[in-house]
Image: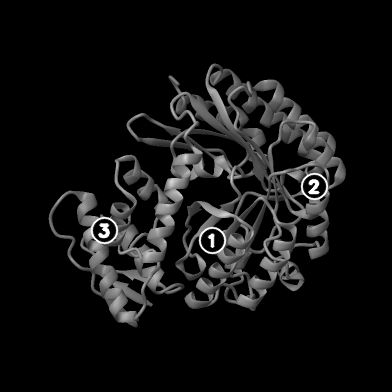
Amino acid sequence: MIGFYLENDEFEYDIRGLLMAFYPGAELVKNPKEPTELVIPIPDAGDGEKTERKNRLKRRLYRELAERTGKELPWGTLTGIRPTKIAMGKLEEGFSAGEIRRFLQEEYLVGDEKSDLAVEIAFREKEILKDVDYEQGYSLYIGIPFCPTTCLYCSFTSYPMTKWEPRMGEYLDALFQEIDWTAARFRGKKLNSIYIGGGTPTSLSPALLERLLEKVCQSFDFADLQEFTVEGGRPDSITKEKLEVLKRYPVTRISINPQTMKQETLRRIGRRHTVEEIEKAFLMAREMGFDNINMDIILGLPEETVEDVEETIRKIEVLRPDSLTVHALAVKRASRLKMEAEGTVVAGGTQEESEAMMAAAAAGAKRMGLVPYYLYRQKNMAGNLENVGFAAPGKAGIYNILIMEEKQNIVALGAGPVSKRIHPDGLIERSDNVKDVNLYLEKIQEMIERKERLYQGI
C-alpha cells in the first residue's frame, strides 16, 4: 500500500498514472489516515498556466520515483494513450525531427528510442493521411459484438455467438436504423474509411454478413473511400463461404488475428482453435486474392516467454502478412484475466522481458519489410510499453491512424463503440452507445438521438 498526500484533486489523475507506472499493481491511498508501507511526497507544481504546471509536477515526481526505484520508464512522464499525437502536433507546427525529439525528451523525459519511434511514426502518418479530408470527410465504425468465445484478456463488448445466433438478425435490424440515420445526416460528406470490428464480425453467418455488406454498400457513396476493413479476427469464425462474401464487396483489408502461435497459450486464454487453423485461414484468404491482410499478436500473455514470442514471429514470417499489429498486454478491469489475477494465471512479466518481447516483434516486422505506422498506449500495459502497427508500403490501416490522431469525425454504430466529433478549434466531443446488446436493441432510438445532438449542424 502506497500513500500520497494532496491538498486538491487538480492533478490527481496524472499523479496516479505515474505512481502506477512505477509501482504496478500497488494499492494507492490518497491522504491516508493510517500508516502505509510507503509514503510518496508529491512535489509542488510551481507557478504558470495549467499545462505547464502539470508537466513540471510530473517531471519532478518522475525523478523522485526513478531515484527511489532505480527504474526509468521508456515513455518518461507520458501516461496518456496517444504519444504520437504530440509529435504530430509539433510536426504540423513546423518543428524539425530533431526539434520534436528534443521537445519529447525535455518536456516529458521520453527516452531516445521512444522519441525516435514517435517522430518516425508522426512523419509516416502525415504522409499516409495527406489525401484524407479532415473537414468534409468522416469515417465509419460498425461494431459486431459477437464472438465464438470471450478471450481471457478481453474487455471489449462481446457476446457468445451460440447464445445470440437466433437474434443476430434482430441486431442487424437495429444497426440498420443507425446506418440509415448516418447516411442521411452525412449525405454530401466524404466517407474516407470504413472499419467493421467487434467482437468478431465473421461470427455472423454468410447470409447475415452479406446482408450487412449489401446494406452498407447501398447506403453510402464510396467515391472518396480509401479503405474498407473487415476484421476476420478469430480463425475459428472464418470460412471459405464468408471470405467469398467479402470478395463480392469492395473490402480492401481484412484481419486474421492469432494473438499467439503457441497452442498451449491459445487454450489458456480461451481460444478454441489451433495454430494450424490460423495458418489455414490465412492461406485460404491469400489464395482467394486478399492482398492486404493484417495479423495481431499480444505480448505478455499468461506464462509466455521471450522465446515463445520469437517462435510466434517465426511462424508469422512464413505467412508474411501485409501488416502486423503488436499489442503489449493491458489487463483491463472488465477482463477475466484481471478477475483471475490473484489466482493461478500469471501475465505480463518484468519490464526487461516485455522490452525483449517488443524488440523481437519489431525485428521480425523489419525482416518482413514492415515499418511502424501507428502507435497507441493503454493503462496497465506490460512493461509500460505500447501497441505498434507495422505495415508494408501502401498497406497501412488508415482508420487506425484516424482514430488515434483524432483529426476526423468518427461515426460509430452498434453496441458499445464511441462516436467522436472533431471541431475546427480542436474540441473533441464524444457520444457512446450502450454496450449491452439487449439495451442497445431497446434503446436504438435513444442512440440515434444522441448522435443527432452530437453532430447537430454538421
For the residues carrying marks 2 and 1, which lies nearer the camera in this image? 2
Circle 1 SS class: loop
Give the crowd class for mark 3: few <14, some 14-19, many >=20 residues within 10 Å: some
In this picture, residue 446 sits left or right of residue 406 = right
The answer to which of marks 2 and 3 sits earlier in the sequence is 3
Circle 3 SS class: helix
Residue 215 appears in view: yes
Write the residue at 81% across / 36% down: 245
Write the residue at 50% across / 65% down: 381
The answer to which of marks 1 and 3 sits earlier in the sequence is 3
For residue 372, the mark is none
Q: Which residue lies furthest to the right in this view?
A: 241
**Which residue has dot 1 on it?**
333
For badge 3, the amino acid type reads Glu
- Figure check: 210 above or below 456: below
The answer to which of marks 2 and 1 sits earlier in the sequence is 2
Determine the CA span between mark 2 and mark 1: 35 Å
For badge 1, the amino acid type reads Arg
Write the residue at 57% across / 27% down: 191
Q: Where is residue 64 shown, x and y percent of the image?
A: 26, 74
Residue 31 appears in view: no
Quadrant location, the C terminus: top left
Determine the CA span between mark 2 and mark 3: 46 Å
**Which residue has dot 3 on it?**
107
Quadrant location, the N terminus: bottom left
Determine the CA span between mark 1 and mark 3: 31 Å
**Which residue has dot 2 on it?**
285
